Image (tube, rainbow, N blue to C red):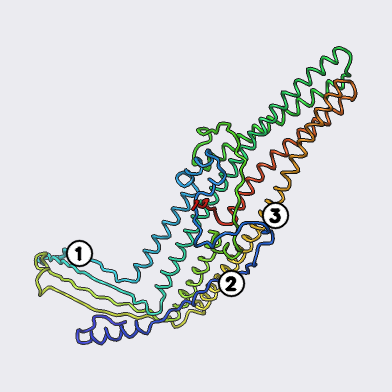
Amino acid sequence: MLSAIPARHLPSLVVATACLLLAGCAVSPAYEVPVAAAPQTFKEAAGWLAAAPADTLERGPWWTLFGDAQLNQLADSIDISNQNVAQALAAYEQARALVREQRASLFPSVKLTGSGARSGGGGEQQANNNYKGAIGASWEPDIWGRLRAGVTGADASASASAADLAAARLSAQGELATNYFSLRQSDAQIALLNATIAGYKRVLDITSNRFNAGIAAKSDLLQAQTQLANAQIDLSSQTRARAQLEHAIAILLGRAPSDFSLAVAPWTLSVPEVPLGVPSTLLQRRPDIAAAERRVAVANEQIGIARSAYYPSLNLTASYGAGASRVADLFNASSSLWSLGVSAAQTLFNAGATTASVDAAKAGHAAAVARYRQTVLAAFGAVEDQLSATRALAEQLALRQQASSAADQVEQQMLNRYNAGQVGYTDVVSAQVTALSARRSLVQVQADRQTTAVALIQSLGGGWQVPQAQ
């Protein structure tokens, strides 16, 4: 340890320090984005629109593509009121503050100190006053790049937090849209069941009259009552499901379920065309992939920070102050004191702790790379899943429409034939069950197409605004 260096040696100290700084090196490995296998095309992409590269895509409120004014109004408040988004925003702000804190370590710190004391002894000794004041500075030159690695790592961590914020927003938006379309599906199912129950009540009245007239068997009456009761049970279940969806939407909007309600409204059945692009653009679009890649960069800098322990540390200090028995004398030149100092430290032996720390950092980097690659693979898988689901649902929609129409006709024919005494009531019940199931399945596939479109947009990393006409 060297301290209180004479002034005549100060130029030599400055020159030596400058040489060390100029010769300084970075201990972190050169960072490269990990290679992740990306297919040339999506397996399920045949017949889909091509998207522009991610850096030229205009991102916007993708939910507006569904053309539902109520959904647009709800989604606009997600950023303001959703608590998961608020949490991610706070984490991002914290990460940015940590970047500023790390950058501050590159610069000298300056402190002002002062003290006052009064002392004395026994007998006739007089009490003495002692006042001191000083300003001091200290600086750790970043010779080996340890501090710069900390700054770079903190900056990468902040970028990861920014991506986490984007992911939180996308997740909240997607969950809101999915719950909203599921709620509108419940409205449609409730309307369908109410109409069905009204029809079943009419049939029950007819069957009851036929039974009272001795035309119909009691089993026909019991079957009609059972049909009506089952439909009413389904209605109760669907009403409960709607209430739960309404509660979930309230929570997404940061509101208490008791203070929130959504009135029944017409269901907009539009499903937008979603441009895909080539798989490689997915690596640029998805916020979870961006966050995983930035955390690889953070892990890379941790290797450098661990390596810096192999090298000596240097610290420069300077101070100027004064000491006197009276406060007024502190400002006299004869009372002034100054010092310049330099200290260096080097670990000679720590039983392999430094090497173990470097090995741990390298293992952490390898784990971050594996997480990044797994995130990429999962992203590709999610897109393929939603593409295949979208194609299958489009085919099912046409088939469900045909099945529902045919089942409605069969139901009406069976009722007419039953009233004419040509068939038993069991045939009517079978036709009614089939018709109701077909109608409800059609409503379900219509909702599935919308929620699958939402999931596809999420899996692609967000949505697009409709291009303006030229």
Are the two marked residues, 2 and 3, in contact with CB atoms closer than 8 angstroms? no
Residue beneath the point at 57% across and 63% down: 281
In this picture, residue 234 sits left or right of residue 128: right
Q: Residues within 10 Å of mark 3 (few under 14, many from 20)?
A: some
> For the residue labelled by badge 2, is the local secondary structure a helix, a strand or a loop?
loop
Q: Amino acid at mark 1?
A: Ser
Closer to the N terminus: mark 2 or mark 3? 2
User: Element under label 1?
Assistant: strand
Q: How many marks?
A: 3
Mark 2 vs mark 3, CA separation in Å: 27 Å
Q: Is residue 279 left or right of residue 344?
A: right
Q: Is residue 233 above or below residue 366?
A: above
Disc 1, disc 2: CB below 8 Å?
A: no
- Direction from residue 356 to residue 26 in the image, left or right: left
With respect to residue 360, does 74 lie above or below? above
User: For mark 2, what is the residue?
Assistant: 35
- Under tag 3, what secondary structure? helix
Closer to us: 383 or 171: 383
User: Badge 2: how crowded within 10 Å, few (<14), some, or many (20+)?
Assistant: few
Q: Amino acid at mark 2?
A: Val
Q: For the residues carrying marks 1 and 3, which lies nearer the camera in this image?
A: 3
Which disc number belongs to residue 115?
Answer: 1
Q: Which residue is mark 3?
A: 388
Q: Position of residue 264 (x, y in %)?
A: 58, 31
Q: Find out whether the residues at labels 1 and 3 contact each other: C-beta distance under 8 Å.
A: no
Q: Which is more toward the observer, 41 or 253? A: 41
User: x, y (%) of residue 277?
Assistant: 59, 61
> Is 352 located above or below residue 406 in the figure?
below
| The disc label shown at residue 159, or none | none
The N terminus - image quarter: bottom left
Above or below 445: residue 334: below
